[in-house]
Amino acid sequence: MLVVSVSVCGLVTLAAMTQPSLAPEAKHSLLQYVTGKYLYAPSCKVEWGWEEPQQVGETMCFTVLCFQRNGQPYPICDTDDLAVSITHGTRKITAVMELGSDDPAQANTARVKFTVRTAGVYTISVTIGKFKVYLFIFYFNITFGINSLYLE
């Protein structure tokens, strides 16, 4: 009798681990964890759409490429906890983020755009959940351009 009840408990636990709907607090199923089919922050990459230094008034754009732990592209969506924070000193800069694409080959991309209003150093932090992509913060230097200088 004890063996049967322990076996049933083990099967129920295994079913809850492999079926996320049975264990809503579990973020990934056991099968996803073993095969690496989940969004993994250290596997993600950032591609910058500019070269430094940039000028004030320009729209900056960069792309976050999302990958699974097993290295395959991860189709990013709203439910994934991807966050981008852009600051200039103590000011938070508003950015527009476009997730995924209609093209299946681009489904793992998140495009971020923001406009530079003042010169200086900008800090860009890309996180997935509590984890930073590449585990560091990016710094970029923005300079005044000829068009942004006041000339008499």
Image (spheres, rainbow, N blue to C red):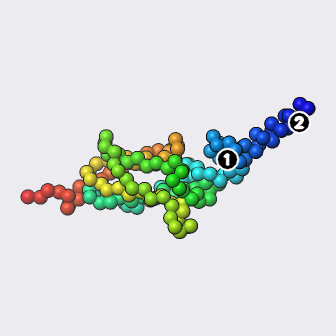
Give how far across and how far down residue 99 sits, in percent.
48, 58
Report if residue 133 is visible in the image.
no
What amino acid is labelled 1 in the image?
Answer: Ser
The residue lying furthest to the left in this view is: 152
Quadrant of the frame with the C terminus: bottom left
Horizontal side, residue 25 vs residue 134: left or right: right
Which residue, given by chain and number where applicable, does mark 1 sit on?
21
In the drawing, what numbered circle is on residue 4? 2
Give the residue displayed 54% in from the left and 50% down from the top.
80
For label 1, the SS is loop
Tell me if mark 1 has few (under 14), some (14-19) or many (20+) residues whose alpha carbon lies within 10 angstroms of its own: few
Quick one: quadrant of the N terminus?
top right
Residue at the extreme bottom:
103
Q: Is residue 43 left or right of residue 52?
A: right
Residue at position x 26%, y 58% in the image:
57
Q: Position of residue 22 (x, y in %)?
A: 70, 44
Looking at the picture, tell me which residue is in the foreground, 41 or 75.
Answer: 75
143 and 126: which is toward the camera: 126
Task: Give the percent coordinates (x, y) of residue 78.
Answer: 51, 53
Residue 5 in sight here? yes
